[in-house]
Every structure is written in structure tokens, then in C-alpha cells.
Amino acid sequence: MEERRVIRVLTVYGPGRFYLDEGRGAGLVAELVKRFEDHVNEELERGHLRVNTVIIPVARNQLVPALLAGRGDIIAAGLTITPERAGEVDFSIPTSKPLNEILVTGPGAPPIERIEDLSGETVYLRLTSSYAESVRQLNERLESDGKAPVTIEPMPESLEDDDLIEMVNAGLLPWAIVDEYKGQAWEG
């Protein structure tokens, strides 16, 4: 990366996260990547021979495959560290505490008081999300207790958690599983 003077950063489009504004990258990822670029160049002390960053947006399910295929050098997309992902790629030191997953419910959702109440229900999520693995683990527990598993209805990989929350809010889905901080952002 230093020799070719380019660091390719894989990310996903999302409101506030990364988007184009008058043809230029904008949002939190763009700001953080610019700060990272400045830090790298400060550390390298190469004067006018700067290392530049290039942000490459891809679908969320393509982040790890694109990195492994050499189409990017790092990922900046808030990926949850799972054992499977940790076996494929290296992660930085987490910038936040471990994440809790929550069930965001909509106006027409049946009442859910305990996670076991999802037995026999359908959840809508991306199959490549960390949430899918959590539901698989829940299903193992439910089935070992003699209860019906949760049905997973695959959602398009192009949808982000924000999109699913919007669909719940509009009554298109009864609920969505998301990281707690994403649900909290919608509370206000």
C-alpha cells in the first residue's frame, strides 16, 4: 500500500454513513477515512509523496469477498466480529463495546416478551448478517427444548439495517433484528 501510495477502503452506502454529495464522498466513513489518510501520511513523513485513500462502495455481502479477492485493502463498514469472519479476515481493535442485538418491533407486530416468543415466527434478515447466525443459534436452543424454530425469510443483501428499520416503521415488516445502537438512533 505504501509503495503504490493508495489504500483502497471498502464500505457500503448508507444515510449518514457514506454517500455521494456533488460527486464527492461524504458521510462518517468519508470523514474517518480522510483522518486515517492524514494520520498515515503524518506517520510516514514522506512529504509530497502522500499515500491516498480511495473509498470503494460495495454491497454489504461483498465486503469480505472483495477484500479476500484483493479488490480492497481494508473494510470500514461497522462489521460485527463473528467467529466465522474472524477466521477469514483480521479485525482492528474494536472502537466500541461489544454489541447487543435487539428486536425492533413495528405497529402490527405480535407481542414479544422473551426471545423464545419468536418460536414459530418469521424474521426478515440478510443471510450474510451476524443476525442470521444469532437466529440459527436460537433455533438450536428452541429445537432442543422441543419448540418450533424461527423461520428466516431472506432479505435482499442490498438492504442495510436502516432500510429494514424503515420497513418496520412503515408497517411493511413486523420486526427487524439490528444492533442496539442502530435501534436507539431511531428512538428519538
Image (spheres, rainbow, N blue to C red):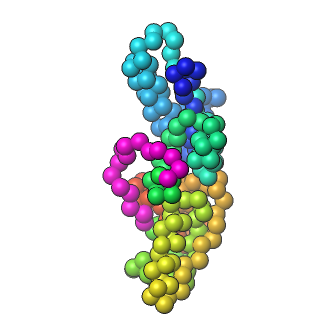
- Which of the two residues, 175 or 42, is positioned nearer the viewer here? 42
Q: Residue at x 55, y 35 (%)?
A: 73
Q: Residue at x 43, y 27 (%)?
A: 35
Instruction: State the predominant SS element of the stretch in magenta.
Output: loop
What x and y, as percent, mark residue 171? 58, 69
What x and y, as percent, mark residue 101? 42, 63
35 left or right, relative to 129? left
Instruction: State whether residue 184 is above or below residue 39.
Output: below
Quarter of the picture containing the C terminus is: bottom left
Q: Is residue 94 magenta?
A: yes
Quarter of the picture containing the N terminus is: top right
What x and y, as percent, mark residue 70? 62, 37
188 left or right, relative to 110? left
11 left or right, relative to 97? right
Q: Residue at x 39, y 80 (%)?
A: 113
Instruction: State whether residue 103 is above or below residue 143.
Output: above
- Which of the two residues, 183 or 97, is positioned nearer the viewer here? 97
Chain part drawn in magenta: 87-102
What x and y, as percent, mark residue 33? 48, 31
- Which of the two residues, 183 or 118, is positioned nearer the viewer here? 118
Q: Residue at x 45, y 12 (%)?
A: 46
Instruction: State whether residue 118 is above or below residue 169.
Output: below
The reply to whether residue 52 is in sight is no
